[in-house]
Image (tube, rainbow, N blue to C red):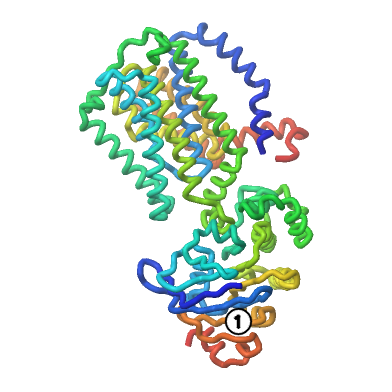
Amino acid sequence: MLEVDHLVTGYGGVPVLHDVSLTLNAGEIVGLLGANNAGKTTLINSLSGMYAPMSGRIRFEGHDVTAMTPKQRVEIGIIQVPEGRLVFPDMSVRENLLLGGINARARAHRPRTMDHVLELFPRLKERLGQNAGTLSGGEQQMLAIGRALMAEAKLLMLDEPSLGLSPLFVQYIFGIIDRLHAEGLSILLIEQNLNLTLRHAQRCYVLERGKVAIEGASDVVKDDPRTRRAYLGL
Amino acid sequence: MRQEFYKTLTSPVWLVILVLAVVLPPLLPSYYLHIVILALVYVALASAWNIVGGMAGQISLAHSLFIGTGAMLSTALLLKLGVNMWLGLVISAIISGVMGAMIAWIDFRFQLGHLSFVLITMAFAEMGTVIVEGWDFLGGASGLLLPQDKGDFLAFQFGGGIGAFWVMLVLAIVSILINVAILNAPLGYYLRTIRDNENAARAIGVNILRYKIAAMVISAMLSSVIGTAYVRYLTFADPYLLVSPIIIIEVVLFATVGGLGRAYGPAFGALLLVPLGEILRGKLGGTLPGLHYFIYGVVVIAVILMSPRGLLPLFEKWFSRMRPKAATSK
């Protein structure tokens, strides 16, 4: 479904990602692991079109999307849940969710998608009229995921969904991720939490200093001694 | 979303305003009428600025450029080339819109942060001052004097005093209604997503460039038209008043004190602060030099400390406390 081919991305001419290749099959959860500064967020932001790559190709469902703007990518179903949640604090939960579905493809089905999202996150239903800024961190994460689902994501890219959450909420969020996976959604999961990601993803890539250091089925990556090393940055 | 706008249009408050507008001005001494007109000018300007500064959260200081274009260019076109001032108003508004679009594009292209945006727009405003001062066509440093206002509507004359009052009232109301319309339309929501978090806005697929340009163009053209009407009222196109940093800082101040990003906030701020400033100057200006500025400053600081989000939210809170039943949902 997603093929990233020899991607090089950088800021101001200095490459951060060197020659990264990655594939994600439809209906799969793929984990993207790595220490701080490994280039995980740069990769996800390149996939959502925030940065133009210096070289390489990105293909989605067989189409070349390398030159597409972020808006066009949202319209074909590549949706990102940005790191740190980033809800719109001065708007109500309902407004946040509705704004998730502003792209041309999703707009017409907003009421139906909204029902589905509220069924996934009953907590949001109780808080529909409340300003998003007043929600707890975990609730904001639910809202950020709910907002991405409102866009009728085909590929959902989650950037550190466990960041700053209590263990209970982390468990809950990963339960939701499993459920979305069971519904057939393709998910790219960026995480610092190694064990959690290895448990939920079928395959993983470990990034190290902007390069893919290890890739393979989660079990294989888990037992590879280099994984721990990449994490400690040795 | 649209219902809110029509509800505003059919509000009985308009009737009250109409009655006041018919009855009050002829009774007012000309000095107080002048204060009312001035307040309306700033209601219109602060509301126009609010589209960019409040809703999209982009503190633009370039608006003195648009106000100045509306004032100086339309005057120069009339005096130097004999262009009817109505046409001058349209030409100035279009040029202001183009300049606004350019500034929005620069902001987008170079991904300016909040502070850089303020500084860049300030530089544009400064550039405007330099161009007007150095170019005789626009009156140079000495400004331009418009012909006497004989009330010839076709020549953009409204007979001063009460005529100017009606023009400014209409502009102020139009400016506020555009705010209400935008806030209740998708554009208003998109602008607020850009203000709250540009990255999140991009992640949900908001076309940031398009909406930044739309906000800036609407705001710039509106400011330009108000500038043209304002200079007709003043009769003297003074570059040190109309293309100066002072006018834009006043606009930003009124909008902030009233309540940024709200449809009626900036208007509220201007309606309170313009008369306050003028009356303080009138009563105290002759006693101790600078005293009226001092008191004015203390009042503004007190307001900002009391309610950082503006006076309108504060008043709404008081009001809903008095009528607890009416304020259950927002």
Q: Quadrant of residue B35?
A: top left
Pick whichever, B322 or A64, lies toward us. Answer: A64
Quadrant for the N terminus of chain B, please: top right
Residue A125 relative to residue B252: left or right: right
Give percent across and percent down for residue A21.
51, 79
Judged from this view, the residue extending furthest toward the front is: A62
Q: Is residue B214 above or below residue A71?
A: above
Which chain is mark 1 on? A
SS for callout 1: strand
Q: Few, some or many C-alpha atoms within 10 Å of disc 1 (few <14, some 14-19, many ≥20)?
A: many
Residue B266 relative to residue A9: left or right: right
Pick whichever, B304 or A190, lies toward us. Answer: A190
Q: Residue at x 29, y 27 (%)?
A: B239
Q: Residue at x 56, y 81 (%)?
A: A205
Q: Quadrant of residue A59?
A: bottom right
Give percent across and percent down for residue B260.
53, 39
Q: Residue at x 46, y 35 (%)?
A: B219
Q: Mark 1 belongs to which amino acid? A: Cys
Quadrant for the C terminus of chain B, please: top right
Q: Is residue A137 above or below residue A62?
A: above
Residue that label 1 marks: A204
Q: Decide if residue A54 is in sight here.
A: yes
Give percent across and percent down for residue B292.
40, 26
